[in-house]
Amino acid sequence: MSGAFESGMDELERLSVDRRGLLLKGGLAAAGATMIGPAAALAGGRTASGKTTKLAVVTHGDTGSFWSVFKAGVDQAKKDLNARGVNVTQVYANNDVAKQVSGINAAVAANVNVIATSVPDASALKGALTQAANKGIAIVTVNSGEDAFDAVPAIQKTFMTHVGQDEEVAGEGAGKQFNAAGAKSVVVIIHESSNSGLTARAAGVKKTFKGKADTLLIPNAKSDIPGTVAKVKAYFAAHSGTDAMLGLDPDVTVPCIAACPSGTKIGTFDLNGNVITNLESGKMLFAIDQQQYLQGYLPVVFSVLYVNNLNTVGGGRPILTGPGIVNKGNAAKVAALAKAGTR
Amino acid sequence: MTATSAHASDERLLRVGVAARLVARPDIGALLGALAVFGLFSIFAHKAGWLGWADAAQWTDQSAQYGIVAVPVALLMIGGEFDLSAGVMVGSSGLLLGLLGTRAHLNIWPSILLVLAFGAAIGFVNGLTVVRTRLPSFIITLGTFFILQGVNAAGTLKITGTVAIENIDTTPGFNSAYRWFSSTVWSPYDFKVKVIWWIGITAVGAWLLARTRFGNWIYAVGGDPVAARNVGVPVARTKIALFMVTSTTAALLGVIEAMELRSTQANEGVGREFIFIISAVVGGCLLTGGFGSVVGASFGAAILGMASIGIILAGWDSNWTYAFLGGILVAAVLMNAGFRARALKARSR
């Protein structure tokens, strides 16, 4: 019910983007977006050893726990490569497509060499990215946007690579983990309807898992967690042979541990504090980590190599940052890294 | 209602048969619907133990998630108003409880009182705005809904750095309150205590509506506010009180959920306002106000809860859940309209 409502709101948002997008064509500054590092800094910083690399990182991300790790990766790479001469601006548009478009337009106006951007909605970013490509700015897609290469043909001439997690490959990784644990029958909890990323994860599991893989769709699961737990319990009541569960979001997986019969092998996508606690205590088997730190760090490295040496990586294929596996063996170490803000 | 001269007596004194009186009840459709849905799954989910207590513990859990707030929402609808902020209020109050306990380190009991007071305050603002501006409550509470949703997401992120508040069980005195709000009874089936809350709230709501002066006022302000005012019913006060009861009950559900999960995330409750309203409508409440039933709303919640759990137990593709719920809604409304037409005919004969 709220799903239909929300998609209606998305439509509204998209319409207003088109209108505002026109206004922003002139290269208006990223009004209201979280802009880190002054745009003016793009000018200086050249060193004797090579050209200064001017990189703009523009994502749909927010300042929450996930993206703060991504940002830590960008910041560290900037520090590490400082001697090579690198200027990086970062815009986190907080899921506001209009802000992301204006961030890309601002980068184009500032004549950067490379734009690293997430593409959650190719049709909304098409105009801004085409403009960037026409100006000869190299484009790296990060986090989401593996299909942007096909969706926005104009960017193909300057497209470098995609740095992110392939959802299906990550699902395959989860399937292998269950194989190794000797699971016979797994249920994948899909917590949103019509989210292609989630169904791709489930498809990946089906591909590699040797036993029976089933999915349980719970529409809008995250807005009724007690109801979700009751539904998972009902699933186990109706499917007594199921001995493994995979959740695709820690906010769903962790409460559902209580719904599983004891001895169920439980895995999840993504990490948080509760996941690490449960991995250490053995209540959960593994977590799939997409290592977003790499998604921030690597584009900076690739940009410096490209600007100075015209190197490209990936050979036309995406650079996968996941699935990184966290389990009982490395949970304590990862917990320390998570505390430091890099995992 | 055309009382012809052939009827010398007042039509209100007309003797109506038991069957006619039964179908005149607003909740008869929901009762039959609940029996039909239960019967349906006792066939298709028989193998998964639908008739056993363990399954009943699951669907009553889900139904209580809907029913606790569907009761005050039904009262509010009979009083002629909507509250679209009732769903998100569940999340807001859970987050507030978490903040008070884990950040301000307040004891759980005063925390609960503060959260309920917060609910009452939001309800008061909703009610006062509706009464003062005479704008549709649909719009006013939609505004409250969006404001609270934004505050939930942005505020939680600002304070905790994530979109959830965890470890609510570290709140001082947590266990003493957990027993009353969120534990389970009757091992090994483990029915949720909130099911008892649901039944209790339904009983109180039904008593309020049928046996008290306030109940009469609710019918009056929903049926015809002008006429109600003319006969001395405090229309504004009644409506504001209804909004406050709705928000406070939603806050109570937020408290129950937050303690049950020991954490709350910012999305909780969003979208459930429609489920509350659907429960009330399935239960025989009219969108125009002045007519409806609290017991019916609880039957409505039971139907929706049984359906969403039963679909999984029956092994059906849960992609169909919403289509199924929509079908139930339409069927219930048609049935209620049919019964109502017959009931009116029975009285005006």
Image: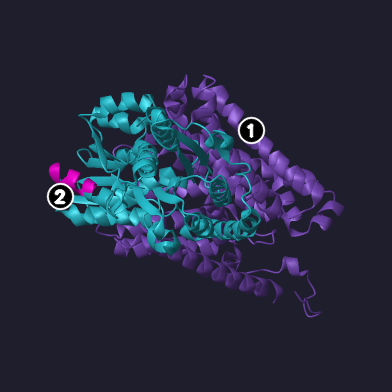
Instruction: For marks 2 and 1, give the CA distance.
Output: 49 Å
Magenta includes A178?
Answer: yes
Q: Position of residue B266 (x, y in %)?
A: 51, 39
Display colour for chain B: purple
Q: Can residue B238 be seen in this view?
A: no
Instruction: List the residue tagged with mark 1.
Output: B118
Position above or below: B301 against A269: below
- Is B318 displayed left or right of B8 in the figure? left
Have a look at marks 2 and 1 and say if they share a chain.
Answer: no
Q: Main secondary structure of the magenta part?
A: helix
| Residue B343: numbered disc | none
The quadrant where residue A74 appears = top left
Q: Which chain carries label 2?
A: A
Describe the element under mark 2 as helix, strand or loop. Answer: loop
Q: Residue at x 66, y 75 (%)?
A: B345
Instruction: List the residue tagged with mark 2.
Output: A184
| Quarter that holds the C terminus of chain A | top left
Q: Which chain carries label 1?
A: B
The color scheme shown is: by chain
Display colour for chain A: cyan
Q: Where is residue A145 in the image (x, y as percent from the top left)?
A: 40, 53
Describe the element under mark 1 as helix, strand or loop. Answer: helix
Q: Where is residue B298 in the image (x, y as percent from the top left)?
A: 52, 52
Amino acid at pointer 1 = Phe
Amino acid at pointer 2 = Lys
Q: Where is residue A287 in the image (x, y as percent from the top left)?
A: 28, 38
Q: Among all residues in the image, which is located at the extreme front?
A: A48
Look at the image and give the residue range highlighted in magenta: A173-182
The quadrant where residue B308 appears = bottom left
- Is B316 displayed left or right of A53 in the figure? left
Pick the front one: B141 or B219: B141
